[in-house]
């Protein structure tokens, strides 16, 4: 089934990329705020990297909470809201359920850890679905 009607058009990949960038800046800022007091002053880049790697679990947790909450409650993360795109259930273009949003957030992390290969799938998929969209049965459309 190919998506994209006059009412609900698939979001362009450029908009999705900008939304991704905005979301990563927001999540990174939150992460740094959480661990800021744990970073040693006058530390080298390697020392800071070592501390940040110790708190990788926090970063992953923040990303999962951020993406799950915003997609579930608002159909879009802050980056997607800024780009005027939203995530909807693929079947009915309806709001996603909590389990869909959570599934999408988990598999988004897996795609990131696998060198973003899951994101590349959107470039070759007729419905522009990345791996996390396919597993959650969602599509990203213009708002």
Image (spheres, rainbow, N blue to C red):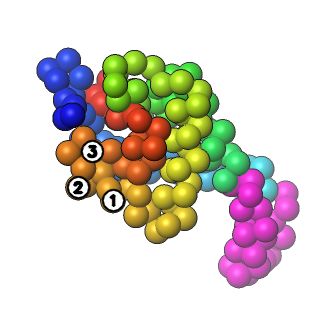
Residue 107, given in percent of the width and then of the height, sits at 53, 50
Which secondary structure is most common in the magenta stretch?
Answer: helix
Residue drawn where x is 35% and y is 35% of the image: 139
In this orientation, which residue lies closer to the viewer: 99 or 140? 99
Queried whether the magenta region covers residue 48, the answer comes back as yes
Q: CA distance from mark 1 to mark 3?
A: 10 Å
Instruction: Name the secondary structure under disc 2.
Output: helix
**Image marks 2 and 3: residues in contact by CB distance under 8 Å:** no
- Say left or right for 49 vs 96: right
Position of 21 relative to 78 (above/below): below
- Say left or right for 126 vs 47: left
Residue 97, given in percent of the width and then of the height, sits at 53, 24
Q: Which residue carries the number 3 mark? A: 128
The N terminus: image quadrant:
top left
Within 10 Å of the Cα at label 3, are there few (<14), some (14-19), or many (20+) other Cα atoms?
Answer: many
**Image marks 1 and 2: residues in contact by CB distance under 8 Å:** yes
Q: CA distance from mark 1 to mark 2?
A: 7 Å
Q: Which residue carries the number 1 mark? A: 120
Queried whether the magenta region covers residue 47, the answer comes back as yes
Q: Residue furthest left?
A: 6
Position of 41 relative to 61 (above/below): below
The C terminus: image quadrant:
top left
Q: Which residues lie in the magenta part?
A: 37-59
- Say left or right for 58 vs 24: right
Residue drawn where x is 35% and y is 29% of the image: 90
* Marked residue nearer the N-terminal end (1 or 3): 1
In this orientation, which residue lies closer to the viewer: 38 or 20? 20
Q: Which residue carries the number 2 mark? A: 124
Q: CA distance from mark 2 to mark 3?
A: 7 Å
Position of 73 relative to 65 (above/below): above
**To which quarter of the image does residue 35 belong?**
bottom right
């Amino acid at each position: 089934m190919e998506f994209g009607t006059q009412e609900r058009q698939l979001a362009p990949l450029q908009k999705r990329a900008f939304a991704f960038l905005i979301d990563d800046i927001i999540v990174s800022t939150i992460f740094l705020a959480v661990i800021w007091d744990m970073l040693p002053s006058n530390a080298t880049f390697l020392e800071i990297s070592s501390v940040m790697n110790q708190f990788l679990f926090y970063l992953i947790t923040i990303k999962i909470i951020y993406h799950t909450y915003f997609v579930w409650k608002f159909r879009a993360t802050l980056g997607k809201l800024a780009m005027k795109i939203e995530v909807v259930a693929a079947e009915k273009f309806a709001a996603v359920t909590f389990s869909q949003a959570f599934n999408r957030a988990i598999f988004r992390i897996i795609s990131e850890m696998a060198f973003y290969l899951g994101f590349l799938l959107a470039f070759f998929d007729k419905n522009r679905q990345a791996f996390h969209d396919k597993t959650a049965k969602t599509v990203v459309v213009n708002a």
